[in-house]
Amino acid sequence: MSDASFNVATNAEPVVTFLGRLEELKGIHLFLAALSKITSKAKFYVAGFGTWSSRVEDAQRTHANLQFLGAIKMEEVPYLLSNTDIMVLPSITMDDGWGAVVSEALLAGAAVVSSNKVGASMCLADPARGRIVDRLSGADIAQAIEDIIDSGLLNETCRKARAEWADKHLTQRAGVAYLLNIFDHVFNGKARPNSFVAEP
C-alpha cells in the first residue's frame, strides 16, 4: 500500500504511463490512439488535467486496461514513476523545451517513449533507455511501446541500469560537474567535454 491517493497495479503486466498536461500539444491524443493498437498485455495510466480530461474519461470506459488518475499531487509523482515500466511523452511541439518528466522517469528506472520534439529525447539514444518516435502517430507510439516490451528491457537489472545512468547524467550534481568541465575548456584550455548525455 502507498501513501498516494491511488494504487498502481504491480503484477506481471507492464505499466505504461502518460503523466502531464492533457493537451494535444503534449500528445495525449497520440497516447489514446495507441491504446487500441497495442497487442501486448499492459496496464495504462494517465495522470494529469487539461482540455482532454473528458476524452481520457471516455477512453477509460472503452479500454478496461486504462485507468485515469486525474490530477495527482507532486508528492505522488515518485510513487507513480517508481511503479511505471514505460513512460510516454509524445509531445507534438518543441515549446516545452527539455521535458522534465523524462528525466524523472529515467531516474526512477522507467524506460521512456518520447517524440523527437522533446529536448530530453537525446537521453534515449541508447535503446536500453527507450525509444524516440519521429513519425507522430498512434501506430508509431504503439510500435515503440511494443518494441520495449518485446525486447525484455523491463526487468530489474535494466531498471537499475537506467536509474544509475540517469544519476550520473541528469542530477544537479552531474550538471555542476559538467559546467565545471565547460569552464575548464573555456578558461583553462582543457579539452572540450563531450555532450553530457554521451559522457560515460
Image: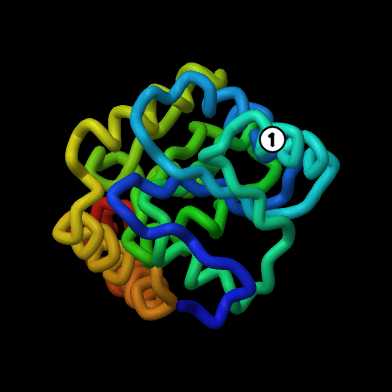
Q: Amino acid at mark 1?
A: Arg
Residue 182 image point, x, y percent: 36, 67
Task: Pick the residue in front: 47 or 97.
Answer: 47
Q: Quadrant of the C terminus?
A: bottom left
Q: What's the residue at 58%, 73% (across, down)?
A: 76
Residue 96 at x, y percent in the picture: 67, 47
Query: Picture quarter containing residue 152?
Result: top left
Q: Is residue 117 above or below residue 87?
A: above
64, above or below 18, in the image: above
* Quarter of the image where one finds residue 13: top left
Q: On screen, 21 above or below 66?
A: below
For label 1, the SS is helix
In this view, the residue in front, 159 or 70, is: 70
Q: Is residue 99 visible?
A: yes
Specify whether residue 123 is in view.
no
* Residue plotted at (46% across, 48% down): 87
In the rendered structure, the answer to whether residue 152 lies left or right of residue 42 reads left
Question: Which residue is rendered at x = 59% and y = 32% of the image?
Answer: 63
Query: Dot 1 corresponds to which residue?
Result: 61
Return the residue nearer the eye: 142 or 101: 142
Judging from the image, the colouring scheme is rainbow
Residue 183, quarter of the rendered image:
bottom left
Judge from the rendering whether residue 69 lies leftward or rightward of residue 84; answer left or right: right
Residue 26 x %, y %: 67, 40
| Residue at x 60% of width, y 48% of height | 67
Rate crowding at label 1 as few (under 14), some (14 to 19) or many (20 or more) other CA atoms within 10 Å.
few
Number of numbered discs overlaid on the protein picture: 1
Q: Position of residue 125 (x, y in %)?
A: 30, 40
